[in-house]
Amino acid sequence: MQQGLAATFPAAVLLVRQKGKTLFHRAYGWIDPEQQQIPVRETTLFDLASLTKLFTAAAFMTLVGTGQTSLEMPVSHIIPEFGGIRPLQQAIDPHTKTPLPIDPKSVGKKINANEVTFWHLLTHTSGLAAWEDLCRRDKSADIPPMPQRVPLAMRRHRLEAFLHSPRFVSPPGEHFLYSDLGFILLGEAIEGLADSSLPEYLSRAIVRPLGIESMTYNPLGHGVPHNQIAPTEFCPWRERRIRGEVHDENASCLGGVAGHAGLFATAEDIAAFGQCFLAGECPILSSDLVKMMIREQVWEGDERRGLGWKLQTPDNSPVGRALGPRSFGHTGFTGTSLWIDPDRELIVVLLTNHVYYGREGEAIKRFRIRLHDTVVAVVDHFPEAVQ
């Protein structure tokens, strides 16, 4: 962790839990790395980035558990404007923001969006593009003010532009393509199914039942001080250092609340959530639904997926090969991760603000592997620590 602090991120918290016992929980670095006046604490909130998707997936599955929906239900049954015949289009690279060449086989072809089910969204097989600029596709380049007080009418207008003309790059069910757009859609469907806002439903269905204390969207808007939140990068679009507002641009232009990104939390919050899936049942989901979420649904190339969760693969795992073959987890673009190894009864939560220095991701990728290799080596060498 000290090596990572010196080269990969200015702030981090690591929490390691095994067999229900916290073995390691420590904070590193500074909220203000230039001045070094405000140290990171175990209670510091971090921008979870795509770890948000795990909570969105779990929230949807609670609605499956109550019979309000099903995995096989078409998305258009809840969001009618999403349905219809849609052309296949160019994808957009989520990092460079540039269009990618369209597959010659897709030129001139159309698909039926009514065939997209919630299973497709949860497994990233909907055919939706990975990303597109929701803020500017309506020709509005308004920079969200702090702390993301985007008027509801503007948020809805931006969503409507996406829902009425979603960008498909392949037919539903044909390929795996990790898609922020699919989880934005899932978050909106939860609101329709639950008849409440996404933050309200997450609080009711996930946060309060698990005793999570700190998790929130828009922490500044909920009175959390700057010095309790790890900052992320200087954003050229927003022309400011991102402090207490979501790093992800699409989540930002949607008012900081979305199904794919936007949540802030502590490592303890994430560990409490992970414990549910390690134990196999918890207050939010039945054991059958937990097992379904971490069961293999899709395996294409190096991508093996459950419902919302990424599953361990022999090659190109984001956490290396030391964790067991039944392990599962997720990563977040800001430098966060949650990984669970049921064979070792092990939970590893790493929260960092790697993007403070920019978006080049190779350093955090290498660091995650080294860290998880080290954690496994230590817990395997000292099994008496959890007896």
Image (tube, grey):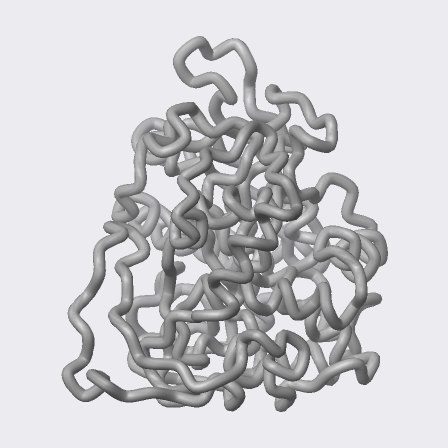
Quadrant location of the C terminus in the rendered image: bottom right
Going by the image, does 8 lie left or right of 121? left
Q: Residue at x 67, y 77 (%)?
A: 78
Going by the image, does 177 lie left or right of 160? left
Residue 273's place in the image compared with 39, above or below, is below
Q: Residue at x 53, y 65 (%)?
A: 183
Q: Which of these two is toward me, 22 or 302? A: 302
Q: Is residue 288 visible?
A: yes
Residue 52's place in the image compared with 279, above or below, is above
The image quadrant of residue 65 is bottom right
Pinpoint residue 122: horizontal percent, then vertical percent.
54, 75
Pinpoint residue 318: horizontal percent, then vertical percent.
37, 60
Q: Which of these two is toward me, 210 or 223? A: 223
Q: Residue at x 83, y 79 (%)?
A: 66
Residue 177's place in the image compared with 23, above or below, is below
Pinpoint residue 246: horizontal percent, then vertical percent.
53, 39
Q: Which of these two is toward me, 60 or 308? A: 60
The tally of labels here is 0
Q: Which of these two is toward me, 20 or 47? A: 47
Q: Is residue 387 visible?
A: no
Going by the image, does 90 lie left or right of 382? left
Q: Residue at x 69, y 47 (%)?
A: 269
Residue 181's place in the image compared with 228, above or below, is below
Pinpoint residue 1: horizontal percent, then vertical percent.
43, 36
Going by the image, does 260 lie left or right of 105? right
